Structures are given as C-alpha cells and as structure tokens.
Amino acid sequence: MSISEPVVAQTVATEAIGAKNGRRRPRKPAAANKGQARRAFYLIAPTIVLLGLIVGYPIVKAIYQSLLTDPGIKNGFFDQGGAWNGIVNYKHWLLQQCPTGGGGTGHCPTGTPGSQFYSSLFITIGFTVVTVAFETVIGMGFALMMNRAFRGRALVRAAILIPWAIPTAVTAKLWTVIFDPQGILNRILGTHFAWTSSLWPARSAIVIADVWKTTPFIALLILAGLQGISHDVYEAARIDGTNAWQRFYRITLPLVKPALAVAVIFRTLDVLRIYDLPKILTNGANGTQTLSILVVNQLNVGINSASALSTITFVIIFAIAFLMVKLFNANILGAQAAKVK
C-alpha cells in the first residue's frame, strides 16, 4: 500500500463519520454563487453578441428581403423592386405560383425555378438518406478495423483519412475524370458509358463520390467513441461465452451511440446543404439539382425570391436537425437508464 492510500482512506472515513453525526461540509453562500454566475455571464457576453451579429444578422436580413419584390418588367415598365410583397415569394415556392401576363398568378410552367422546388427538395432528401446510410455502415466498419491493434495501423488510419482531407471541388473534378466516357472506370469495365448523362447513373455517381469523400469523417468520430470503451468489458463478455455479433450489438453499439449520433447529425446537416459536388459533377442536370443549387440559380433571377427560398431551406434543415437531436437524445438517455437498471 502506498503512503497516500491510508491518507485517502482516513479522509473518506472522517467524512463518513461526520455525515453520520449530522455534520455537513460548509456550502458556499447563495450570494457567492450568484456572483460567480454574473461573472460567467460577463465573460461569455461578448461571444454571444459576436455570434448574434455573425449568425443572426444574415438570417434577419434574408427574412426581410424575402418579403420584398424583385426587379423586373411589370405592366410594360421596368420595376426596380424593393416594395413590400408580403408572403408572395413564399407562395411562389410552396404553392408554385408564378405571375402571369395579366397581373395575376398561376401555376408555374414546367422548367421554371418555381416548378422545381419540390423535385429539388425530394432529390436533396434522397441524397441525404442514401449517402448517410452508406457512410454510417462503411464508417462503422472502418472504425472497427482501425480500433484493432495490428502492424501498420497508423499508416492505415492516415490512408483512410486522405479522401476527407481533399477539398470537395478537387474531389468532384477527380470523379469527373473517373466517370468520363473515356475515363478510368470505363477503361476498367471495357465500356463507353456516359455515367453522368442520364438520371440514375448521374445520381449514383454523386452518391459514390460523396460516400468516398466523407465516410472517413464518420469513421473518425466513431473511432473516438470506440477508444473510450474499456477492453475489460469485452474480456468479461468473452468469458461469459458471447460471440462477436453479441459483443457488437450488446456492448459496442450502445456505448458508441453518442459518437454515432453526433456523426449522423453532422453528416445529415452537411448533405442537406450540398452544392459543390453535384454542381461540378453534373451541373445539377439529370435529376441531380439540390435545394442549394436551386437557390444559387434563383439568385440570377431575383435575390428577394432567392432569399425566400433560402429561408424555407433553413427552416427545413433546422426542423430536421431539431427532430434528430430529440430522437437521438431520447435513445441515448433510454439506453443509459436501462443500463443503470
């Protein structure tokens, strides 16, 4: 026994005897706690104000602009725009109402930006569901592999993280060369197929490129969670006669769930605003136009209606993020409560 152990034991015993006799350790007065809380608020107040200016001002500005008219030809004359327009711009996107020649509104013609809102929304959600699902499964496999001890593990970890370190624009150009009719993929397969010139091949190309680039991000977060699990837990499970699947389902998955939740939420929010990869790879053609591409395209038509679309996109992403945080928190807290019981 070390010298410090008797001291610790004596201290614990003294505290226990004191608690038994009704003596409590003195607590700080309420005034001191309020003073600490006030000082803490003063310290973080500049950061809150700065974040309010950086984040809050653009949101308020976009909402204000979304309620104004866009410049354009109206009744044979050029209108500079900027007049109060109410929720007309929101009706333009949500109800697909476009102005007609007689001064009224009607259903947006096919091919106009107003008619492409719901198709772009479903495409964005489809990309999100498919890519996050693939990245989570593959990232979990990579994380389990990197968490094991083997020769050359550091080199494998570095190699897996390389795609994530490459800028998205470079990744898009790289896969453009791969999917070119005269590119590497067709040379390997012995074909001359135009991968980005039709509907489902173009969508598959974007999914493949995005999964290749961002799977290491999920793998890295899951690996951080795996390294917090003690090997003694797995050793005890092996002694109890559990197989590999039981150890994964009963031990690894519940304990890594907080890190997995963070990875899935981050990636979901990232894919919901995806722009550069489909823009460079397919230019948004052949059923690959996302909401972000539609917003940028609308900027060339009218900035105020584009502000309305960006506000709608922000609300959709915020709602999905809120639901996911609530869902994952409920699952994590439920698993922890069951574990305590």
Image: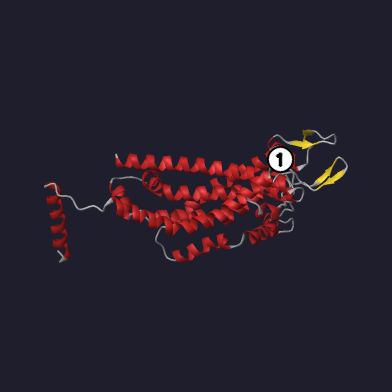
Rendered location of residue 207, percent (x, y): 62, 49
Q: Which residue lies furthest to the front in this view?
A: 31
Image quadrant in which the C terminus is located: top left
Camera-nearest residue between 242 and 306 = 306
**Residue occupying the point 66% across, 57% down:** 172
Residue 136 in sight from this viewpoint: no
Rendered location of residue 198, percent (x, y): 73, 46
- Say which quarter of the image contains residue 330: top left
Instruction: In the rendered view, tell whether residue 334 sits above or below residue 223.
Output: above
Query: Quick one: SS at disc 1?
Result: helix
> In this rendering, would 341 be left or right of 54?
left
**Residue occupying the point 31% across, 47% down:** 237
What amino acid is found at the position of numbered circle 1 in the picture? Asn
Camera-nearest residue between 190 and 302 = 302
How crowded pointer 1 is (Cα within 10 Å; few <14, some 14-19, many 20+) is rated as: many
Colour scheme shown: secondary structure
Rendered location of residue 183, percent (x, y): 71, 59
Image quadrant in which the N terminus is located: bottom left
> In this rendering, would 301 be left or right of 231?
right
Instruction: In the rendered view, tell whether residue 96 sits above or below residue 219.
Output: above
| Number of callouts | 1
> In this rendering, would 89 be left or right of 319?
right
Instruction: In the rendered view, tell whether residue 281 sits above or below residue 125.
Output: below
Residue 5 in sight from this viewpoint: yes
**Residue occupying the point 30% across, 52% down:** 31
Q: Which residue in the structure is indicated by mark 1?
A: 89
Rendered location of residue 134, percent (x, y): 55, 47
**Residue occupying the point 63% across, 51% down:** 274
> In this rendering, would 8 be left or right of 152?
left
